[in-house]
């Protein structure tokens, strides 16, 4: 189960091979495979663990107070910051996001075929 | 001083005597001259000589400082002596210069305004007036001051009355002036009499010395001071004793108006300075109190009241006359604060205002000469029909308001600075306020002149009709002078500071 | 070259760039203009190199005397040197990037803007600084207006705020100079006088202090494609220079910087427009610099200088890649993009280099400069600001540096198959990417960066120690892991179309509504009170007229009898005053 399979655009509308792919991008198409995307997760986890272990053996020259007792402190910090902020995203959006026509000055230009427009069309047919 | 070398020694040494004697003598001669043109020529030559002499004397004064000329070789206090010091030397030059400039202007103006058979007496009276003004400025004898004050006043009444050829109201204005001027002179001479009683001398330096010895003197000296202040107040149009002034300015012949506005009240202000700071002294309590409460109070009320009145006038000359009353208020304020800086600023305003008002009245006279303009609405389109005259009027008008780089700005900023230094912040506010009022009444004229189209006469728009050269030269001389003072003010500011230091001692 | 023409040493090299910009404004030949745009900053850079004398503390020139004010229009010392080089380099890169665009206004205003920024950092006195401060504002607003109709109002707002900042700078400068005996030299200013505070506020506007930052996010995303790239290079960095020169070591700046580093995160999460996200990212990075200036040690200031240098290139790289996308697709909205690496692989690569530089990944230049600032902050034991800065760094990695490339080039496939960017864009991005990597190369590369840094340090900071690399990677991996986890559990907020409110809401919405309300109220009030007002004014006017008009009491021709009585009365008053005098 992955995010990508959920979106209808992903596999159905545009195949991942063919002439319209830039030649230099061909070798990297493997990145779009479901399996790769789903398991990409493990790469940072492994890196995180390695670096945390390294950090235990090479402690920081200038740690924060009490930091030396927490192995992998910066990894935990980064993880928590992202989770904390990321979970607040909806709240922020509630307070900060308004429709694009809010100020009445006109939004920024859109391409002729806006995705949302075509999605709406797709739903209708 | 390199320039001083060009003046012969006898002129400098006898200059003070020469200054009063020459116009007195020539007045008599001019009155007898038959032809109107010769009258002008003799007046022109006399005023030219006077200007040169006054210039030489002013330079000589800077060179040697105060010097005394003994009439007939009799030494004071018994003989009559003439004083030239830092206080009156600039005023002598101012009176002579303004006379000279007015005389140039008078050539076309008198032809339009004075009947041919009255022109020689006109010039004679004019010369008498000059003699009187110069005399009362240079003399060191208190009674002589009265004599010359009367000489100038009586000739002035005549001159004002000569406006009757143009406007019959000149007669009533001259009569009014005569009555009040005589009251003023009487008050003054009564004051002199009391002072003589107190000190036993008529020489002003002696009086000063004796009064200082008596530490202000008895009640007699106080009464004398009161009479002298009121007498001079009438002469210098101190509010509310100014009632003679608007009529006299509005109805007299235009050269007379310009000359009176720039010299007569100024000479009286000089006498006020001379008596309050030189003969009497602000260290006497009654002098200080009168300065503080009467002169400043009346000066400030006059500034506001006369400025407001000027705003509502329809006759331009009356408007400028009320503006003069307001400007006298500035000078009285400067005198009343009684610090060296403020007296210097007041004195500076005396000189600058003479130049500004002279320029304005001359330009106004040229407008009357061409179009018969006296009322405000007649100014329509003057920017197009008389661009040069109107240009000079604009410059002098801006200077009156106190726009930077003009003479008016220099004296107003000095006065405001002096008031602020003395801690009189409310006075700074009043100066600002009256400058705004001046902006209103001058600005109103300028708007009409520049933004309304010229009137139509018989279906045709009035064409450009510039004043003659003999009028433009004096008008522009004064306008340029006020800009020159505004940009290069050091010389005149130094002169005024010297005058103030003479009166109050350095510092 | 310098010896042959001694005049060159007297004239601020930035002036030549401004001059070239003015010429460009009149030059109708496009190719010649492009040659100017690239060559003149290059020449200016060479000139600065020639003029710089490492043995000398500072080279002064172009001294002009205006009355009591002495202007030193040209001062080259170690602090201004790195900024001058940077601006020349940025000018060249921007010129290459905009090579495809045929627009006289953009060329000329870009050159004037670049020149003004160079002249500004090379200015030795506060008056020249002010002039260049305003010139950067005025010349750059055209770049915003080139963004199309919807950018017009934003440009006006930008101009108003920038000019306001300039006026505050000038007022502050005059006050400061007055307090220091008329000395207009631009050196350390400090916060002892109101002039100092005013100048700090002026610089604060220009470098985006919290609550004063909104002009940046308002205007930058609305400019033209090349315009945004150019804008992002100069204005704020110029302000950082001024701050570093004037207010180094002011403790309050540490806190200001720390708050500046974190608050943009909240906006960046919600934002849809990639260029606006990048503007928030700039703001956060500026926070690091401001905090570094607040610390004020040699190491911190070196870090600030280096961080500015790297940041201009890396942020430029991201702006350029987003610009390339916009050039081909027509929009920079995240909700409209995705999966573009299939058609724009090179741009993708450059964007990743930029993102990794900004994220301070080892082997990329940001790794070194950010470490400078963080180490300097913790060396001085500012623990709370340090945590805040680290929070800002982690947050911006997550929601700007990962979000931008992810939503443009990866993520769900938008299905758009476009051409790769033009060659000149690749060249410009390539140069910037190369420098970003080169300046961090562990074997000799970062020594070049050190050589540019303005101050001598007690010991050369070694960036590639095991602990530093390990902990920095921990942070990045931690964020990346959380990001993937979010994707996996569908907690990641997909970009949605929205207008994100910022402080500019205060005047774009609230201020507008308040003034509309007030005007409506005023109309009603005046309708209600018209009668009373008219009656009052009429009465007052009549009274005035009755008193002062020619027919009125004050100017009536007073009969001489009355005047004589008045005189007598006044005499009485004077005698009374004299009588009761002490």
Image (tube, coloured by chain):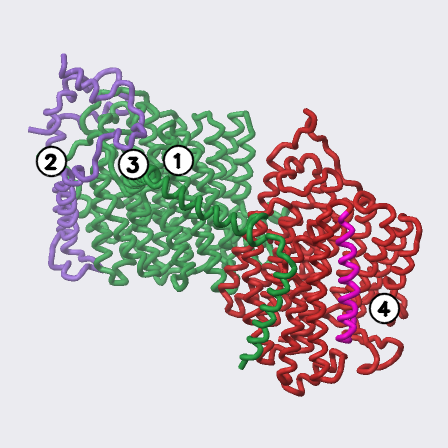
Chain colours: A purple, B red, C green
Relative to C435, say whether C256 is above or below.
below
Residue B410 is situated, as x and y percent measured from the top left of the image, at: 62, 58
For marks 4 and 3, give the one nearer the viewer: 4
Q: Secondary structure beneath disc 2? A: loop
Q: Are marks 3 and 2 on the same chain?
A: yes
In the shown orientation, is residue C232 left or right of residue A96?
right
Q: Earlier in the sequence, mark 3 or mark 2?
A: 3
Marks 1 and 3, how far apart at CA: 15 Å
Marks 2 and 1, how far apart at CA: 37 Å
Residue with the mark numbered 1: C155
Relative to B262, say whether C34 is above or below.
above
Residue with the mark numbered 2: C491
Is residue C314 something one can see in this rendering? no
Marks 4 and 2, how far apart at CA: 106 Å
For disc 3, the chain is C
Marks 3 and 2, how far apart at CA: 23 Å
Q: Residue at x 13, y 49 (%)?
A: A76
Q: Are marks 1 and 4 on the same chain?
A: no
Is there CB contact under 8 Å for labels 1 and 3?
A: no
Q: How many numbered marks, from 0 up?
A: 4
Write the start and end of the magenta stretch as one range: B138-164
Residue C110 is situated, as x and y percent measured from the top left of the image, at: 46, 35
Residue B360 is situated, as x and y percent measured from the top left of the image, at: 69, 49
Residue closest to the eye, B292 or B143: B143
Disc 2 crowd, CA 10 A, few/some/many (<14, 14-19, 20+)? some
């Amino acid at each position: 189960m992955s995010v990508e399979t959920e979106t209808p655009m992903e596999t159905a509308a545009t195949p991942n091979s063919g002439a319209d792919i830039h030649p230099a991008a061909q070798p990297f198409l493997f990145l779009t495979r479901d399996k790769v995307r789903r398991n990409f997760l493990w790469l940072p986890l492994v890196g995180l663990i390695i670096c945390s272990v390294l950090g235990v053996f090479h402690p920081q020259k200038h740690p924060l107070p009490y930091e030396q007792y927490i192995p992998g402190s910066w990894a935990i910090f980064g993880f928590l910051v992202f989770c904390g902020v990321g979970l607040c995203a909806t709240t922020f959006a509630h307070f900060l996001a308004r429709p694009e026509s809010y100020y009445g000055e006109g939004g920024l230009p859109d391409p002729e075929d806006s995705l949302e427009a075509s999605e709406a069309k797709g739903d209708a047919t | 001083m390199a320039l001083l070398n060009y003046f012969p020694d006898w002129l400098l040494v006898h200059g003070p005597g020469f200054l009063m004697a020459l116009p007195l003598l020539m007045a008599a001669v001019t009155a007898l001259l038959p032809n109107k043109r010769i009258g002008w020529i003799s007046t022109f030559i006399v005023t030219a000589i006077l200007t040169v002499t006054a210039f030489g004397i002013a330079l000589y004064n800077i060179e040697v400082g105060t010097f005394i000329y003994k009439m007939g070789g009799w030494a004071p206090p018994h003989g009559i002596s003439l004083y030239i010091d830092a206080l009156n030397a600039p005023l002598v030059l101012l009176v002579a210069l303004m006379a000279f400039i007015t005389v140039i202007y008078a050539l076309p103006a008198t032809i339009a305004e004075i009947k041919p058979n009255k022109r020689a007496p006109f010039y004679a009276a004019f010369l008498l007036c000059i003699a009187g003004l110069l005399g009362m400025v240079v003399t060191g004898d208190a009674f002589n001051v009265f004599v010359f004050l009367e000489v100038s006043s009586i000739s002035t009444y005549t001159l004002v009355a000569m406006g009757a050829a143009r406007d019959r109201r000149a007669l009533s204005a001259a009569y009014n002036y005569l009555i009040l001027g005589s009251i003023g002179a009487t008050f003054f001479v009564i004051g002199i009499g009391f002072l003589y009683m107190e000190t036993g001398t008529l020489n002003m330096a002696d009086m000063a010395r004796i009064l200082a010895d008596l530490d202000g003197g008895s009640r007699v000296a106080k009464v004398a001071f009161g009479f002298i202040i009121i007498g001079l107040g009438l002469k210098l149009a101190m509010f509310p004793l100014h009632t003679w002034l608007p009529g006299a300015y509005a109805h007299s012949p235009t050269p007379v108006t310009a000359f009176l506005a720039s010299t007569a009240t100024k000479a009286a202000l000089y006498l006020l300075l001379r008596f309050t700071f030189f003969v009497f002294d602000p260290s006497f309590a009654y002098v200080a109190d009168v300065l503080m409460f009467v002169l400043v109070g009346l000066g400030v009320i006059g500034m506001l009241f006369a400025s407001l009145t000027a705003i509502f006038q329809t006759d331009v000359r009356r408007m400028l006359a009320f503006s003069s009353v307001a400007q006298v208020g500035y000078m009285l304020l400067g005198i009343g604060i009684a610090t060296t800086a403020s007296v210097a600023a007041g004195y500076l305003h005396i000189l600058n205002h003479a130049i500004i008002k002279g320029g304005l009245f001359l330009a106004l006279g040229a407008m009357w000469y061409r179009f018969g303009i006296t009322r405000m609405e007649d100014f329509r389109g003057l920017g197009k029909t008389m661009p040069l005259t109107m240009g000079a009027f604009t410059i002098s008008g801006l200077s009156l308001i106190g726009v930077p780089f003009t003479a008016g700005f220099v004296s107003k900023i000095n006065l405001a600075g002096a008031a602020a230094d003395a801690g009189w912040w409310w006075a700074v506010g009043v100066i600002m306020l009256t400058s705004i009022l001046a902006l209103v009444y001058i600005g109103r004229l300028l708007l009409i002149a520049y933004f309304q189209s010229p009137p139509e006469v018989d279906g045709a728009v009035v064409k450009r009709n510039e004043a003659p050269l003999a009028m433009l030269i004096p008008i522009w001389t004064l306008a340029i002078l006020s800009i020159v003072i505004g940009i290069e003010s050091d010389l005149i500011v130094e002169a005024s500071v010297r005058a103030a230091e003479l009166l109050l001692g350095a510092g | 070259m310098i010896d042959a023409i001694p005049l060159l040493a007297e004239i601020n090299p930035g002036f030549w760039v401004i001059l070239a910009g003015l010429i460009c404004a009149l030059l109708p030949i496009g190719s010649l203009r492009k040659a100017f745009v690239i060559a003149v900053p290059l020449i200016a850079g060479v000139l600065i190199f020639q003029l710089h004398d490492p043995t000398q503390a500072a080279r002064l020139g172009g001294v002009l005397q205006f009355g009591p004010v002495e202007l030193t229009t040209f001062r080259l010392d170690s602090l201004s040197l790195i900024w001058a080089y940077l601006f020349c380099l940025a000018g060249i890169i921007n010129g290459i990037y905009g090579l495809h665009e045929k627009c006289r206004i953009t060329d000329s205003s870009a050159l004037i803007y670049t020149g003004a920024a160079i002249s500004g950092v090379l200015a030795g006195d506060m008056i020249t600084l002010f002039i260049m401060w305003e010139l950067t504002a005025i010349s750059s607003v055209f770049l915003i207006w080139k963004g199309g109709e919807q950018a017009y109002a934003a440009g006006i707002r930008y101009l108003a705020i920038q000019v306001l900042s300039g006026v505050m700078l000038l007022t502050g400068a005059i006050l400061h100079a007055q307090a220091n005996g008329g000395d207009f030299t631009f050196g350390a200013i400090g916060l002892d006088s109101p002039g100092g505070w005013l100048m700090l506020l002026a610089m604060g506007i220009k470098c985006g202090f919290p609550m004063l930052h909104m002009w940046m996010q308002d205007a930058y995303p609305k400019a033209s494609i090349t315009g945004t790239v150019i804008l992002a290079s100069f204005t704020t960095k110029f302000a950082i220079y001024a701050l570093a020169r004037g207010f180094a070591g002011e403790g309050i700046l540490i806190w200001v910087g720390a708050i500046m580093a974190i608050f943009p995160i909240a906006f960046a999460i919600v934002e849809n427009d990639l260029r606006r996200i990048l503007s928030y990212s700039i703001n956060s990075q500026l926070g690091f610099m401001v905090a570094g200036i607040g610390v004020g040690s040699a190491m911190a200031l070196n870090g600030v200088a280096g961080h500015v240098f790297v940041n201009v290139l890396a942020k430029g790289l991201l702006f350029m890649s987003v610009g390339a996308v916009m050039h081909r697709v027509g929009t920079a909205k995240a909700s409209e993009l995705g999966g573009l690496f299939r058609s724009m692989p090179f741009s993708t690569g450059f964007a990743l280099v930029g993102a990794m530089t900004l994220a301070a990944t080892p082997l990329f230049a940001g790794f070194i400069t950010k470490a400078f600032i963080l180490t300097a902050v913790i060396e001085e034991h500012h623990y709370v600001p340090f945590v805040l800065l680290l929070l800002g760094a982690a947050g911006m990695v997550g929601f700007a540096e990962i979000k931008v490339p992810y939503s443009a080039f990866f993520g769900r496939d938008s299905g758009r198959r476009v051409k790769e960017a033009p060659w000149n864009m690749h060249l410009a991005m390539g140069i910037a990417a190369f420098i970003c990597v080169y300046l961090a190369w562990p074997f000799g590369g970062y020594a070049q960066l050190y050589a540019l840094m303005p101050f001598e340090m007690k010991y050369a900071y070694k960036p590639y120690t095991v602990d530093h690399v390990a902990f920095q990677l921990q942070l990045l991996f931690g964020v990346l892991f959380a990001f993937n986890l979010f994707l996996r559990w569908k907690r990641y907020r997909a970009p949605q179309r929205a207008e994100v409110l910022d402080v500019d809401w205060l005047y774009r919405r609230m201020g507008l509504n308040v003034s509309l309300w007030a005007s409506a109220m005023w109309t009603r009030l005046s309708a209600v009170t018209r009668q009373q007002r008219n009656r009052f004014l009429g009465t007052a006017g009549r009274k005035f007229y009755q008193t002062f008009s020619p027919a009125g009491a004050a100017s009536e021709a007073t009969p001489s009898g009355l005047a004589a009585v008045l005189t007598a009365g006044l005499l009485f008053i004077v005698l009374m005053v004299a009588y009761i005098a002490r």
